[in-house]
C-alpha cells in the first residue's frame, strides 16, 4: 500500500464473462457519451525509446496506462505497462496495477467481442496464428463466445517443435499458416509480425480475420492491398485508421480510405453500422484503447 492506494504487481485472474461484459458496457457507454476516449499519445525519449499513454474515462473513474518501450544496448527492449485509476468524484487514486497481464486480457477480450459481433453464428473452426501469451488469451476468450469444434494453432516455434505449452488436447498444431487457416471460419492473428502473414482477400466470404497491434512501426499482419476487398471494421473509428499499419499504408497507396471503414465496436453493439455483407471476407483491427484498460482494471476494485 502507498498512501492507502492498492498497488498490484500480480493482479488476480478475472472471470472471462465478467471481463467481456465490462467491455460491452464500456463500448456502449462510449457511443452514448457516458464514457470518454482521448487519443493515445506517444512521447519519444531522449536517446531512444518512447512511452505510450492510453487514457479513458468511465463512470466515476479516470484511468491512464503508461507503457514504456526502452531499447537496450544488449538484448531486447524493456517493455512494461502500469495502469493508474483515479476517482472522478474525489480526485484520489484508487489503484495502481501492473498491466502486463491485464493488457493481454483486454486485448483478447476485445477481439472476442468482435468475434461475437462479426463471425457467423455457426462458426465452428478456429485458426490462431501465434503461440505466446496473447495467442493463448485469445483462444480462451474466443472459446467463450463460440463453440469451436476444430481449433488449429500455428507459429514457427510450434512448427519446429520448440514450444507448444499452454494449449490443451483440443488444439491441433499446424505446420504452416496455410494449413491452420484452410477452411477456418475465424482466424485470429496474434503475432509481432511487421509484414503480412496472409492474403485475407483470397479467403472465403464471411471468413473473419482479426489483427492486433505491436510495437513494430507500421506493423501489419495482412496485405494492405487487400483492404479494399474486405469488409473492414475497427475497435474505435476515430483512432484505428490513423494507427493501424495496414490502414495507413493502404491509404498512402491510394487503395483504401478511412471512409471505407464499415464500423467499430460501439456501433456494432448499438446498431449504428451495417453488419458484414456476407459477400466478402471480414477484417477486424484493434489498436488498443484506454477505456479497455480502465474497464478491466476497475473490475479489480469492484470485487
Image (cartoon, rainbow, N blue to C red):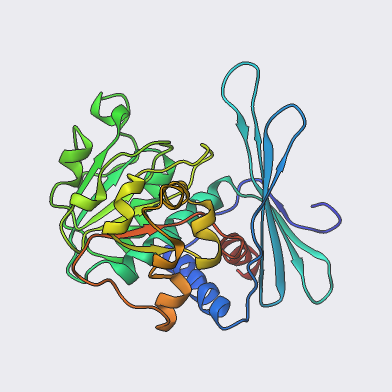
Residue drawn at the location 20% of the way across and 34% of the way down: 176
Q: Residue furthest front?
A: 254
Percent position of residue 73, x then y:
65, 17
Give the total of numbered labels.
0
Q: Is residue 62 left or right of residue 202?
A: right
Q: Residue furthest right?
A: 3
Percent position of residue 154, x then y:
26, 38
Tell me where residue 234 sits by quadrant: bottom left
**Residue 56 sits above or below residue 126 on the image:** below
Percent position of residue 246, x then y:
42, 48
Tell me where residue 120 sits by quadrant: bottom left
Percent position of residue 191, x then y:
39, 40
Residue drawn at the location 55% of the way across and 73% of the way down: 26
Q: Nearer the viewer, residue 259 or 159?
A: 259
Q: Is residue 179 left or right of residue 65?
A: left
Q: Nearer the viewer, residue 119 or 293?
A: 119
Tell me where residue 296 sits by quadrant: bottom right
Q: Residue furthest left?
A: 183
**Residue 87 sits above or below residue 272 on the image:** above
**Residue 56 sits above or below residue 83 on the image:** below
Rendered-image quadrant of the C terminus: bottom right
Residue drawn at the location 63% of the way across and 40% of the way down: 80
Amino acid at each position: 500500500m502507498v498512501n492507502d492506494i492498492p498497488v498490484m504487481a500480480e493482479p488476480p485472474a478475472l472471470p472471462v464473462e465478467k471481463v467481456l461484459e465490462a467491455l460491452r458496457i464500456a463500448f456502449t457507454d462510449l457511443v452514448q457519451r457516458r464514457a470518454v476516449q482521448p487519443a493515445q499519445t506517444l512521447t519519444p525519449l531522449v536517446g531512444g525509446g518512447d512511452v505510450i499513454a492510453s487514457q479513458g474515462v468511465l463512470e466515476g473513474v479516470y484511468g491512464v496506462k503508461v507503457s514504456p518501450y526502452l531499447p537496450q544496448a544488449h538484448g531486447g527492449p524493456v517493455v512494461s505497462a502500469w495502469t493508474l485509476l483515479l476517482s472522478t468524484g474525489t480526485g484520489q487514486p484508487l489503484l495502481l496495477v501492473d498491466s502486463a497481464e491485464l493488457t493481454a486480457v483486454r486485448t483478447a477480450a476485445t477481439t472476442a467481442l468482435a468475434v461475437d459481433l462479426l463471425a457467423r453464428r455457426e462458426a465452428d473452426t478456429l485458426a490462431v496464428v501465434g503461440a505466446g501469451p496473447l495467442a493463448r488469451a485469445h483462444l480462451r476468450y474466443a472459446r467463450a463466445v463460440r463453440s469451436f469444434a476444430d481449433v488449429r494453432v500455428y507459429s514457427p516455434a510450434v512448427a519446429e517443435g520448440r514450444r507448444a505449452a499452454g494449449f490443451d488436447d483440443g488444439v491441433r498444431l499446424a505446420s504452416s499458416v496455410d494449413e491452420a487457416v484452410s477452411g477456418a471460419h475465424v482466424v485470429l492473428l496474434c503475432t509481432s509480425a511487421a509484414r503480412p502473414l496472409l492474403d485475407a482477400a483470397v479467403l472465403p466470404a464471411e471468413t473473419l480475420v482479426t489483427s492486433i497491434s505491436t510495437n513494430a512501426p507500421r506493423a501489419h499482419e495482412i496485405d494492405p492491398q487487400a483492404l479494399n476487398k474486405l469488409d473492414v471494421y475497427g475497435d474505435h473509428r476515430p483512432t484505428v485508421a490513423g494507427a493501424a499499419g495496414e490502414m495507413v499504408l493502404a491509404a498512402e497507396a491510394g487503395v483504401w480510405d478511412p471512409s471505407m471503414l464499415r464500423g467499430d465496436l460501439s456501433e456494432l453493439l448499438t446498431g449504428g453500422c451495417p453488419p458484414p455483407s456476407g459477400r466478402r471476407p471480414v477484417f477486424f483491427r484493434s489498436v488498443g484503447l484506454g477505456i479497455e484498460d480502465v474497464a478491466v482494471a476497475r473490475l479489480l476494485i469492484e470485487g
